[in-house]
Amino acid sequence: MTDEDRGPARRFDDVADAAARAFRLLPAAPQDEEPSGGRERRSPAHRLRTDPDTVERDLIKLVLTLVELLRQLMERQALQRVDSGDLTEEQEERLGATLMILHDRMVELCAQYDLKMQDLNLDLGPLGTLLPPAE
């Protein structure tokens, strides 16, 4: 029986199982490590916990985060082009409408997977958050 015969639900299960096995191979940082040689103790890295039941949602969250990052970058570039006068009025209208439709679709996709737009702003630790704060 091929993957096509098993249907998308079975393929999602296979992906979830494979991801869970892969993440179990990641080592966790020692929780009780003592500082050595006068160095400051850093907080230990968080162990990545996976759940086969949520792997699809987590993957969707990651994909939507990347799409939102690209959407925001495109929006900023469009604003720069509008400010510099590079676009005709018709191009500005079309670009604005397209960006609004993309934003609305992102909100719909987030709702479909029980996410909020704020959930897409990944915390990168000492680097801060991936996306700028909402205006």
Image: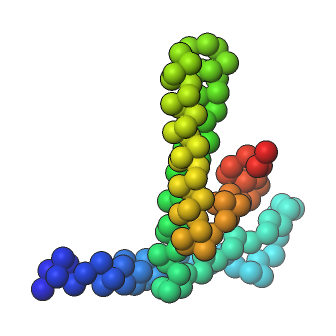
Residue at 60% across, 20% down: 81
Spot occupied by residue 41 in the image (x, y as percentages of width and height) = 83, 67
Q: Residue furthest left?
A: 1
Tell me if residue 2 comes above or below residue 101 in the rendering.
Answer: below
Spot occupied by residue 133 in the image (x, y as percentages of width and height) = 77, 49
> In the image shown, does 57 or 107 lie closer to the viewer?
107
Q: Quadrant of the N terminus?
A: bottom left
Quadrant of the rendered structure where residue 19 is? bottom left
Residue at 67% across, 65% down: 116
Tell me if residue 38 comes above or below residue 31 in the rendering.
Answer: above
> In the image shown, does 59 or 116 lie closer to the viewer?
116
Residue at 56% across, 77% down: 27
Quadrant of the rendered structure where residue 37 is? bottom right
> In the image shown, does 134 or 1 lie closer to the viewer?
134
Spot occupied by residue 74 in the image (x, y as percentages of width and height) = 56, 36
Q: Colour scheme in the image?
A: rainbow
Spot occupied by residue 24 in the image (x, y as percentages of width and height) = 50, 82
Residue 52 relative to residue 115: left or right: left
Q: Is residue 35 visible?
A: yes
Q: Quadrant of the C terminus?
A: top right
Disc count in the image? 0
